[in-house]
Amino acid sequence: MKVLAFDQERCVGCHICEEVCSDTWFKTTDVEKSSIRILDEGTGPLKAVFCVQCGECIDVCPTKALYRDRKGIVRLKKKLCVGCLSCVGFCPYEAMFYHPDHLEPFKCIVCGQCVKECPAEALSIVEEAAPAPTVTEQWETVVG
Amino acid sequence: MTAQGSRRVLAEFAYEVPPVERGYTNQTLYVNLSDNTITAKPVTEEMKEKFIGGRGFGLWLLWHAVKDDTKWNDPENEIIISSGPCGGITQYPGSGKSLVVTISPLTDIPIDSNVGGHFGPLLKFSGWDALEIQGKAEKDVIVVIDGQNGRVTIEEADGVPVDSHLVGHWLIEEMAEKEEDRYFMSVVAAGSGAEHTRIGCLNFSFYDRRRKAPRFKQAGRGGIGTVFRDKRIKAIVVKSPPVRGDSNRPADPERIARAGLRLHKEIHDYDDQQNRMRKRGTPYLVQIMDDYDLLPVHNFKFGSHPDTPKINGDVWEGRFSQGLPDGCWYGCTMSCSHAVDHYTVRTGPYKGQKVIVDGPEYETIAGVGSNCGIFDPDAILEINFYCDTYGIDTISFGTLTAFVMECYEAGILDKEKTGGLELRFGNADAAIELLHQMARGEGFGKIAGQGVRRMKEYFVKEFGADPQFVQDIGMEAKGLEYSEYVCKESLAQQGGYGLTNKGPQHDEAWLIFMDMVSNLLPTFEDKAEALHYFPMWRTWFGLCGFCKLPWNDIVPPDNAMTDEPAKIPAHVQNYVEIFSGVTGKEVTADDLITMSERVYNFQRVFNIRLGKGLREHDAVPYRSMGPVTVEEYESRAERYDKQLRELLGLDPEKMTTEEKLAALRKYREEQYEKLIDAVYARRGWTKDGVPTLETLKRLGIDYPDVVEVVKRHL
């Protein structure tokens, strides 16, 4: 399973990744629409917030709009989403985002655009073991 | 499910589905089953301004539909279902409730019941702020509201099953053309038990996308299911256009989203440390109530039992399927609508079927469990399943069965009188058979199904029971059975039950902890203020389409540091934001209370109009105030003796238990009368419990017909 990885030693805090992300997915420079956020808390190294594809949000979604695709990436079927934002409130990494311009939340789906554009090579895509099935996925096998 | 039923259209009404505007569609749907008329009625600005929606709309429509002498089974009585302006938003937990109003067969006055499931919001998204059903059909019917195609029909329903779990499945399979249709359908149904008793409830469905089955929430109180079957309705179905995040068309979606995100986060961060609602739901309360001697045991005689750990929250956490988003409307991360899956029914007509049991909730566990001396989780599940599918209210069933059991043990009843049922405390098999008899309309079940008030009369007349004794132990007021809290040691909660509009249901006021445990209400004035504020506050949820639980079953971590922790000020502010965000009307926290005061006082006048609603009708049975029997006194003798010494200056050592019972009773009954005086004064009512003309004027509900009712009693 591919996930985004962040090297805090390399990050220079240029925020280009945020701009690239919001431009790629929303054609805007508004970084509040980015699915990656670089945080400078003033002490210690910079931090990055993005989805690690853990899948906890899948079990919170009342409509099964969130699912894991064949590559292991957690994705949102907008057609099923009722905009309840449960996933935003319940993401343990605070990496599911809300923006008032949109009914549906958004998240990183490992498209790799930010990796390509990062001048400091602080971002990369790495392979990780697939996590255990979610409760929702287990129910699918029971109920069919 | 078998598809043996057939549908034949008796009447049809085509309509344009209007857009929702700021939480309202601005029309209500009127259906008359006597003459098969179906029509749209406008929602006026006056209705929105004064009655808001939900319970307010229900009472307003009912007031104009009935006469002063209308009884529950007269054709002009109505069943009204309405959510409210905020009902159907998806971003804030607990925002999909429906309020049901009718004249109750138990109390003969309006009952209101707050219920989950998807019906209310889907009704709105199908174009209707409320559904008003009047008249009586000649044969069994279903009412279908198709918001996808703008069509309402009344249909004959030959062979369609009546019990909720069957009719719910049947209709969804019958009417859903594709999987997605199931998501946006909701069925309202009762059951065979509702036909033969006065304690019928309604089941409101929501489609569970993981379990791939309809689930049910109950409008339990007051016999609404009985009215439903008396009108010969088998089911009401709504089929709505797909729900979106903005289906309710709020004025300011971001304001609602921000409030929702705050609460989602709070639940995520603190629920595990607070009530564990997401894992165990309301059953978390069982052990706490037992610990504080508040859990009803043996018809409210006692407040705790050594076997409570067999039915407490730990047990239910183990039985409920975990890790699912069990909200009864979208976005409810409080997620308390838990279920026991794959339960095998062990008795009755559905013996051997594997079913989903929705619940049990705290009230069911305490009512059909501890209050009846039943501490077997499987027996509780069996009763819970059958109550729901038969359309019987678990609270009334629990409280009335507990009453029957005490009467049995006191010798008022015996096997001969019950037709062979040994209805002693703890006999689960007998309780289950009583329930099946209610569904079949047979035997002692038919008598018991009339409710505690009518049983008292019957036992006195037919079995020579002592009228005082059955009055003292029969836990009903205004004709409605008590919900499941022992309030002997909380005067404020005695008022919280007695000084209600609809009868003793805790959704108006739950003050036991504030009063008894935290001692925050030491004076009559303090108690009266609480019995003003909290009933008004809790009424407000039912005007707007909200659930009460996300208000105080989770609290912000700094809540204890606020000026008024019992009110949860941060959450009240969330509701201010949401109401303004939906309707576009800027309001304050005080405005919310005024909205409720209008509806609450209107309901009080409605009660008076129908012959109740005065001081005499706010009387409560002594079992709710103090110990009735010697056994009961002596079980807590230390507590009561101390009170005799400290409050009354008596020496219990020199008194018999009977003398002590009498002295304590005199004191407690006087306290209750003083409480009534203080509460009526605070609410702006006369000493007889009648809202004054000044009160009606201040609230802007001094309509001529309202004033006329009040004037007869001033």
Image: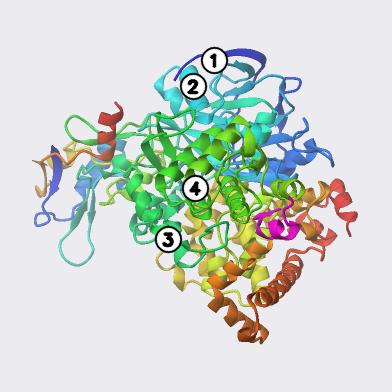
Name the amino acid type tagged 1. Answer: Gly
Q: Nearer the viewer, mark 3 or mark 4?
A: 4
Q: Is A17 part of what is drawn in magenta? A: no
Marks 1/4: CA–CA distance: 37 Å
The label on residue B170 is: 2
Check disc 3 and report the residue beneath it.
B287
Mark 2 falls within which chain? Answer: B
Helix, strand or loop for disc 2: helix
Residue in the picture at 73% in, 73% down: B670
Mark 2 in CB contact with mark 1 (< 8 angstroms): yes
N-terminal of the two: label 3 or label 2? Answer: 2
Percent x, y of residue B90: 46, 41
Does residue B365 sit above or below A113 in this rendering?
A: below
- Image-based side of B259 in relation to B201, left or right: left
Residue in the picture at 88% in, 57% down: B713
N-terminal of the two: label 1 or label 3? Answer: 1
Q: Is B475 part of what is drawn in magenta? A: yes
Task: Please tell me if label 1 and label 4 are on a single chain.
Answer: yes
N-terminal of the two: label 4 or label 2? Answer: 2
